[in-house]
Amino acid sequence: MPFLIPIIAPLASAVGLGGFASWLGGSTILAGLARFGIGLAAKYALGAIFGQQEPQAQAVQLDTVYGEDLARTVGLGVYGTAGQKLYRNAYGSGNRSIQDVYKLSDFRITGITRVRAEGEWRSLGGIEDPVKGFRVQGIDGEIWVKVYLGTMDQVADAGLIDEANPPGRWSEDHRGAGIAYAVVTMQLDREKMQQPWEAFFEVQGAPLYDWRKDSTVGGSGAHRWNDQDTWEFSENPVLMVYGLERGFFNGTEMMVGKGVPAGRLPLGEWTLAANVCDESIGLLKRYSAGVIAAAGSGVTHDQNIQPLFESCAATWIEDASGEFPIVGAAQSTVFTFTDADIMVDETFRFSTKRTKSELINTLAGTFRDPDAFFEQTPFAVRIDEVALAEDGERLAVAIPYGAVNKAEVADRLADIAFKASRFQGNGDVVIHPMFLADAKVGRWCEWDSAEFGTRKFQILEKTLGPLGDKGARNIHLKLQEVGDEIFDGTDYTTVPPVPELPGPPDYQTEAANFLAFGVAQQVTGSAEKIPGLRFTWNAFTDITVVSVDIEYRPQGQTDSIVKRANVPDQVLITSDGVLAATTYEYRHRIITRPVRTTFFTDWATVSTPAATVPAVSVGLGQLQQDVYQELANLRGEITDTFSRLNDLAAAVVDASGRVAKDNSVAVRFRNATAVALRTMTASIEETEAGLEAQAEILDAVQATVGDASSGILWRMRAVAGTGDVVAQVVLDIRATAGDAFAAAGTLWEAGFVGGDPLQPFSRMVVNVGSFIVTDGTDTGTPLVFEDGELKLQVARIGTAIVEVLQSANNKLVITGHDDEAKIELFA
């Protein structure tokens, strides 16, 4: 927090050596802190009034940027970025393989620590692919990231060259020398990854030069300013400011920075500031930062370094010795003066109180939290109840720390800013020239006063008076009261709670209260009931669920049936493949849109009831009148049906060929199967003899248990055109046990021989082992054919060739050939 700087920072107005502590430019943080008066640049307060605020560098770039002529950027410390998209390429089957190139910095970096995918930080790991790099871990989709650190000697990416579509879009000349970038390779998939990944990276930024590790300038180590390969990654904000002051270069081109000569940056003062930042407090350094510094597009050097000063509560000093920061920490006093050392003939002003506009008693603020993807996150609010009572009203301010990415550092800076505002003594004094060597801007001094007591002050401004009647080179000082307590963190022993991010959306993984019941379903138009299964569940609260897949099977079997119910249905009833008095296993899974991976639940069981078939008790004798009436009705229906068939045929578009339609149902349980099939075909073909039209319906059923089976085939065929005009019905039934079988069938035909109207024919052929006609009584059967013999109620007929007819004694006797057969008809 930049509290040790003047309200107004004028240039030295007196003749001779002068100095002042100041910022290099405006700062968004100061808009709320103008009331402090503890070293804040008043010019920003004026800028806020007139709307002249300028953006500062931040530790994050939340949105991907596109295009050319953008500001150059250099990432320092740990920062988050969506990058600048430079290139997209699609290739492979259906162009479902995607390559994206993102620039991460216009200077080298030290690595990518993690990436954001599916709303969480994900690591890069697994076995490195020599072309695609490392895979993003913990997701179903396939995303690979290959990082180029931005060295000057890096080569072009081989995968981009090989897969360029069309070839040549990426060549060996596309090296990106000095530019850090990432190549992202993705494989689109209907379920796992439907659209390209929106990239976001956590980057470990540029390596930094540390003169403390350079043995050629008084340090100890191999660091060299002119050899960037010797630099190391650091989060020390003073090292970042030093690098920006001198400039970050790719070769001879400065990417970001000011280009100040090393001689203007006294290493003694810079070393003191860097060491303070590196002091360990608990498990962390005292101060750390991350920032994306920029150059171009109206971005100033001032805007780059101010967030870094804020991150270490630094004061910026410019005097004859050079330019350097003094970071926020307690200092030893460099000299003590008394009332006797104050030049009484000079201007004197001192106040033990600030104006109310410079006081605060409530402080809040934000920092860039990596766990929240570097979004602005609030730290703990500070309320000084004693100060609040003293001030009589709430004096609040909010501080956004744009370059701070650790909650502990933000908490420490807030403590410093809060407590510093309550040191209220300030003044302008002129002291004896004897203190000239020690009175330096930014240093602490002590005033031992009989009237005001002993107090510590920081020197905000220093100017030298002229030679004259009042003295020789008197020292004019602007003072602000300070104290060791400002930097004492014992008053706040807790780090502000890091807010928890919202968890992943509460998606449903299965249907609530999913139940199954065995039911008996009424057959339409019949008293018969067949077994079925009824599934129910609660309505879905998850709007992404679009349907439910239900799978069921007889217990102990592997083959199953899957049915789908679409939202908002909450009931599914099925008899497909369901047997009576059987235990079934069932389970379900939900189907979502957008698609996400879902799984079937564990198996549960349900039993079906027994089937119900009504009793049949109809005497055959009752059928006589019904049969005659039914035959009469049937003739009328046949006439109507043929008329409808003629109308249907006339309505069809004129076209030859064949049309077929199949309907079937099948079920299997253990070693049993049951199958029913209906096939309907219609065709018109042009033959050498002319057009031939055929229409056919084939019904077939079959039931099998082990090696025993039974089947029925019913076929109706109508043929017209060349040859005979034929209407044909075939009924065939068959029972099989192992290799043996029994069959029965009938063939009905009607037509004209060769299509000649003068040669009609009709026939019925019956192929059975026994043919029985009964009159419905208990006394006999009028006609029976079995074992090759036709038996009548009044006669028995075997194989006969009738030759003799005679009548005697009220009976007719027909004698067969050679007496091999004889029919006796009784009167």
Image (cartoon, rainbow, N blue to C red):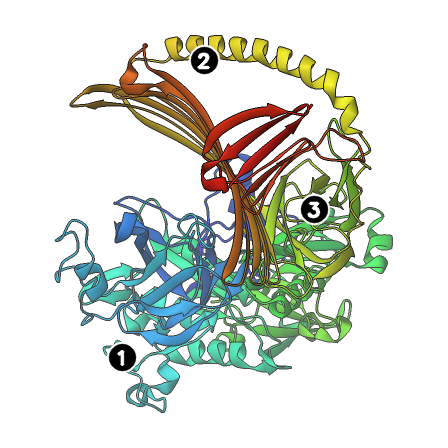
Q: Given the image, on which type of amino acid does mark 2 rest?
A: Leu
Q: Contact, CB < 8 Å: mark 3 with mark 2? A: no
Residue at the disc numbered 2: 645
Q: Residue furthest front?
A: 808
Depth check, mark 3 against mark 2: the one in front is 2
Q: Which residue is mark 1?
A: 229
Amino acid found under the numbered disc labelled 1? Asp
814 with respect to 554 (left or right): left
Q: Nearer the viewer, residue 541 or 614?
A: 614
The part of the image, by quadrant, that contains residue 365 is: bottom right
Residue 386 position within the rendered picture, expressed as x and y whole percent measured from the top left: 85, 59
What's the residue at 36%, 54% (across, down)? 294
Label 3 secondary element = helix
The residue that appears at 77% across and 43% down in the rendered structure is 538
Residue 795 image offset from top left, x and y in percent: 64, 33
Number of marks present in the image shown: 3
The image shows residue 545 at horizontal and vertical percentages of 63, 44
Residue 641 visible, this angle: yes
Quarter of the figure with the C terminus: top right
Dot 3, crowdedness within 10 Å: few (<14), some or many (≥20)?
A: few
The one of 801 and 739 positioned closer to us in this rendering: 801
Residue closer to the observer: 188 or 99 = 188
**What SS does tag 2 mark?**
helix
- Residue at coordinates 37% horizontally, 54% vertically from top-left? 83
The mark that comes first in sequence, 3 or 1, is: 1
Q: CA distance from mark 1 to mark 2?
A: 92 Å
Residue 357: which numbered mark, if any? 3
Of pointers 1 and 2, the one earlier in the residue sequence: 1
